Image (cartoon, rainbow, N blue to C red):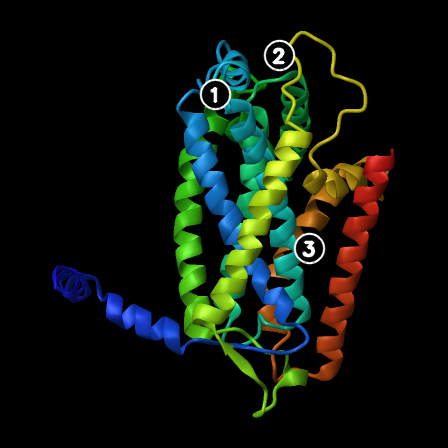
Amino acid sequence: MKTETLRLWLDERLGIGALGGLARKKTVPLHRHTIWYYFGGMTLFLFTIQVGTGILLLLYYRPSAENAFESVQFIMTDVQFGWLIRSIHSWSANLMIAVLLIHMFSVFFMKAYRSPREITWLTGGLLLFIVLGFGFSGYLLPWNKLAFFATKVGTDIAGVVPGAGKFLLRFLRGGDEVTGATLTRFFGFHVAVLPAITTMLVAVHVILVQKHGMSTPSSLKDPALKTMKFVPNFLLRDLIGWVLAVGVLAALAAIFPWELGEKADAFASAPAGIRPEWYFLFMFETLKRIPAKVFVFDGEVVGIMTFGIGGLFWLIAPFLDTSQSKKRMSRFFTIFGVLVVLYIAAMTLVGFLA
């Protein structure tokens, strides 16, 4: 009786019954591409792992050039299971970016960005850029030598953006050089600014997904197409994937614990073969291979502008490739997506082998 009274009390104030009814009505299309639907939920799950492990690390981390390295060292050597939490945080960050890329490309190739899901695509694209911002800002926080010089190179690249380069450089670094002010600034981005923006965008993205449902490729739209209930059928399959992800993370963290390296020293020489994390590697290798001059323009500026225009074109794809547009335009976007995937994979591989 008390349980029923509590349920009614909560339902009156939170509308739990209406939400439960909505979840029970939701269905997921069953077809040969259904497997790609699981990557959205997996990305969200890995993000929650990031939040949980990040909060635990935050209890001991000290964001200053004098103490950052030592605090991470303390976490790894003196805090019980601290090394495991840090390794899971680092590995889940990499897996989250990989899963998010798979999710984005699967949405792109299934044309799931078309009307009425344009805003869903935009919020997802913005979330990708923000997740990359998480990776870039979090990389510096241990304040080790490799992260210090990688951040210097990365912010140098931002400094060549035409017109806004000098402002961006000083905005990111908190000055003209990578110093303790840069570390504090990146810490603020990583634990406050980016999480706040991410929370809002994730909320909008999830609400839109619930509103419009799972998109079915136009070639498979059939009144007789089978569906499964989201609750409990699809959700239970999602849960199985999440449990497997926890096992993979635990295995990676135990077998390949994340190393700390040497403390950053601004007066030391840069380590040989310095390169960014794998998700920035294709851009890094591209910029390395562009000639110093392309006609009358600086090669690095041309590369940065090309990436910027490409990213903008990717975001506005739903407004160009509409369901009413010609098949030739739709085919162009499919070919464009394949070329993007092949180029990213090829340049990333070149970066690892270089």
Identify the secondary structure beneath mark 1. loop
- Image location of residue 151, percent across then percent down: 63, 26
Q: Name above or below for residue 346 compared with residue 141.
A: below
Question: Quadrant location of residue 263?
Answer: top right
The furthest residue to the top: 267
Q: Residue 80 got which mark?
A: 1
**Is 308 positioned to the left or the right of 289 in the image?**
left
**Is 3 positioned to the left or the right of 86 in the image?**
left
Q: CA distance from mark 1 to mark 2?
A: 22 Å
- Image location of residue 212, percent across then percent down: 46, 74
Give the residue pinned by disc 2: 263
What residue appears at the point 52 percent right and 69 percent down from the top-left corner?
118
Give the residue pinned by disc 3: 310
Nearest the eye: 156 or 183: 183
What residue appears at the point 60 percent right and 53 percent down from the top-left corner?
100
Split into 4 quadrants, where in the image is the C terminus? top right
Identify the secondary structure beneath mark 3. helix
Q: CA distance from mark 2 to mark 3?
A: 37 Å
What residue appears at the point 21 percent right and 62 percent down from the top-left corner?
14
Q: Name above or below for residue 100 compared with residue 122.
A: above
Nearest the eye: 174 or 127: 127
1 vs 2, front mark: 1
Tell me the kind of residue under disc 3. Answer: Gly
Tell me the kind of residue under disc 2. Answer: Lys
- Image location of residue 247, percent across then percent down: 59, 44
- The answer to whether the residues at label 2 and label 3 have Cβ atoms under 8 Å apart is no
The furthest residue to the front: 1
Tell me the kind of residue under disc 1. Answer: Gln
Nearest the eye: 262 or 330: 262
Question: Quadrant location of residue 150?
Answer: top right
Sequence-wise first label, 1 or 2: 1
Question: Quadrant location of residue 353?
Answer: top right
